[in-house]
Amino acid sequence: MSGPSIRDTFFEECEELLEALVEGLSQMEEDGQNMDVINAVFRSVHSIKGGAGAFGLDQLVGFAHTFETVLDKVRDGEIAVSEPLMSLFHRSGDHLSDLVAAARDGTDTQAETEAALTAELEQHLGEDAEEEEFSFDALTLDLDAAPPLAELQFVIAFSPHRALYQNGHEPLLLFDALAELGQIEVTATHDTLPDFDAFDPDDALLSWRITLTTAESETTLHEVFEFVEGLCDLTISTEERPAEIIPFEPMTELGDSDGDASADHPPSPDPGAAANAAPVCKSTTSSAAKDARGPKPTLRVDLDRVDRLINTVGELIINQAMVSQRIEELDIPTVAHLTNELEAYKLLARDIQEGVMAIRAQPVKPLFQRMSRIVREASDATEKKAKLVTVGDATEVDKTVIERLADPLTHMIRNAVDHGLEQPQTRIEAGKDPTGTIRLSAAHRSGSVFIEIADDGAGLDRERVLAKAIEKQLVPADADLSEPEIDNLLFLPGFSTAGQVSNLSGRGVGMDVVKNAVQALGGRVSITSQHGKGTTFTIVLPLTLAVMDGFVISVADQTMVIPIASILETIRPRTADIHPVGTDCEVVSVRGSYVPIIDVAENLNLADRITDKTTGILLLVETELQGLVALRIAAIHDQRQVVIKSLESNYAAIPGVSAATILGDGKIALILDPEELIRLAQSRGPDPVNQLPRMELRHG
C-alpha cells in the first residue's frame, strides 16, 4: 500500500497550522501586544499560503495573502488590535479553514462570504490594497536585459533565544541557507558562561556575527530568518565592522567520512588567547545534539491499521488470561521459573496494550478549538454576545471517541447559546456581563472522561419545560415530577421549547440525538441547572473503547467485572458500622462520614437483600451523581486487564451494565457501571439513596 501523496501531506499539515491559528487568535484577544503570538499567527497563514501556491490553489492563495497582509501591518504596528479586528480575524480564519477543506475535497465555498471578508480586510489596507495584489505566476528572466546587481556586504548579528531551540529550529540550517546567497563568514561569540554546576544544556548561550557578501536585497535576508522571528535577536546592517572571521563550511560537508577523531576532538586553543578569543562556530555538530534540539519525528499511519492492531492486542490479552487459567487448572506443583515466565508474559501483554492505546489517544484540543467557531456562528445567528472558555483541552481521549463526539458536542454548544444565554440587555438588567460565557471542560475522573458544557445563562425554566412536555403529550397532564425528572424531559424525542423555527432550533431534533450519540459510545449525559445562574451538561465517557483494568467479582452466583479506576477502597464491614436509614436503606460509617450502601445483586434482580450485614464486601466508589457510595458484592477474585466488548452492538443494553468481556475460562462476564447502578437504586422506590444528601469522604 502506497503512502500518502505530497498533496495529502500538505493538507494534513494545514490542519496543524489551522489549529495553531485558532490558538494564536485566542491568545491575541487576551494580549494584543504580544509579538510572539502575532508572529505565530502570521506564520500560520503565511505557511498555508506558501504550500497552496505550490499546488496552484489560487483561490486559497489569494485570500490567505490578503489576510496575511493585514496581519503584517499589525506586526509593524500600523494597525492596532481591537475587538472588531479580532472578530474579523476569527471569521477570516474560519473561511481560510473552509477554503482548505474545499481545496482538499474538491468542493466550492460561498463566493459572497469570501467577497465580503476580503472587502473588510482590504479596508484596513487602504491605498495599499491594490499594490498588495499577489500571484504565483512564473517569472521569466532575460539575462541580457540588464547588468547583474552590485554585491553588498551585510553584517548580521544573530542571538537565538532558548525558545528557538525548544521549537525545533537549528542555526546551522539558517547559515546553510545564507551560504546559498553568497560568500559567508561566521564568528561565534558569548557574553558570559555559567559555572559548571549552573550549566543548563537547553540555554542559548552562543550568538553569531555573520558577514555575507551577496547581490540579494536585505528583504531576502530577512526571509531566511522569517520562521524564527520572535525567537531571536536579529539585526542586519551594511556597516563594516572589524572582527576575526572564520570561514563557514556548508552543511553538505558535515562529518568526517574517514572517521578521523580530530573532527570531534579539535586541538586545544592557545591558553594565552583563550581569554580573548570567542568559540568558533564549527560545522561538525554531533548528531545527538541535533536530535535533542530538533523536532520529534512523527509517522502518519492509516487509522484502519491501528484498529486492526488494537483488535489483535485484545485477543492477545484474552489468550494470556486463558493460558494462565489452563495452567492453574492443571494443579501442578508451583515451579518458580514457570510462574516467572507467566508473569513476564502478562507484563509484556500489558506493555503492548498501553503502547498501542497511546497511539490512539489524542488531546481534545482540536475538537474544542472547532467549538469556538460554533459559538461565534451561534452568537451571530441569535444576536447574542458569547465567548468560549476551554479547560483541560490537553486531556487525551481515544481518537474514535473524539471523532464521534463532534456532532453531539456541536449540538450542545449551539443549544447553550440559543437556549441558555440571555440577550445582552437582559443580562445587563440582571447584573451580568452582557457577554455570556460558555465553559467547555474535560478531565479524567474515576476511570472515565468527563466533558462539561456549562453556560452562565438564566438556567432551565422548569415550568415551561413541563408545560411544553404536557402540550406535546410526552407526559400526562397530572404528572408530578421532581426537578431532575423535569430536566431529563429535554432528552425525550421531539422535545423542543423553541417558539419558532430558526437556523439553530425548533425543528424537532433535540437533545435526544445527543443522548443517543453519547450512549452509542458507552457513555451517559446528565443535566444540572440553577435558576438565574446557568445550566451544565455533563458527558461521561469511557477512557478507552478497548481495554481496561478491573476487579473480577462475584455478585450472587454471577461473575462480573468492575473498573478499578472507579474504586477508592474495599471494606469488610463490621455490624456496628452499618446503620439503617428509613425503611429500605443502609449506610456505612467510614472515618466519620456516612456512605449509602447499594446492594448490587438486589438492584440487578439477581438475589434478595443480604440480611447478614457482615456478609460480603463493600466497594467504596466515587460517582458524579451521588458522590461516595458503597457497593455491596459477594467477593473479589482477581485483578486483571479485560478486553471491552460492546453489549449494545452484540446483544442489547442492560441497565447497570456498561459492556462485557471474555474471561480466561472462556466465559462472558458483564462489566458494571457504578453510575447506572445508583440510578437503578433511585428508581426502585421513593426512599432509599435519593433521600440521602450527597456524601463526601472526610479524612482524619
Image (cartoon, helix red, strand yellow):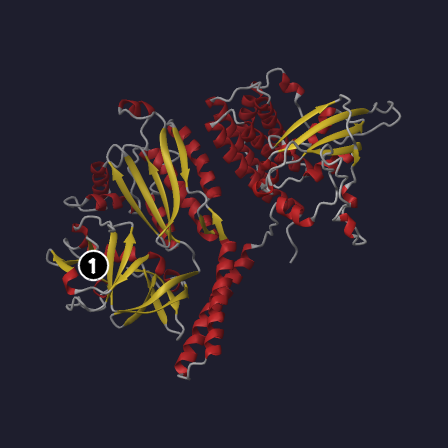
Is residue 675 found left or right of 76 in the rendered image?
Answer: left
Amino acid on which disc 1 is placed: Ile
Residue 451 position, x and y percent, is 37, 45
Looking at this view, is 465 or 228 the one in front?
228
Q: Is residue 288 visible?
A: yes
Look at the picture and state if 276 lies above or below 620.
above
| Helix, strand or loop under label 1 | strand
Which residue matches tag 1? 597
Residue 441 position, x and y percent, is 39, 42
Q: Quadrant of residue 609?
A: bottom left
Residue placed furthest toward the top? 127
Look at the picture and state if 567 lies above or below 39.
below
Is residue 48 found left or right of 282 in the rendered image?
Answer: left
Looking at this view, is 186 or 304 the one in front?
186
Residue 636 position, x and y percent, is 30, 68
Q: Is residue 506 visible?
A: no
Residue placed furthest toward the front? 272
Q: Quadrant of residue 239?
A: top right
User: Where, quadrant-wise, is the N terminus in this rendering?
Assistant: bottom right
Residue 201 position, x and y percent, is 60, 43
| Numbered-mark total | 1
Q: Quadrant of residue 544?
A: bottom left
Look at the picture and state if 7 lies above or below 25.
below
Look at the picture and state if 506 lies above or below 356.
above
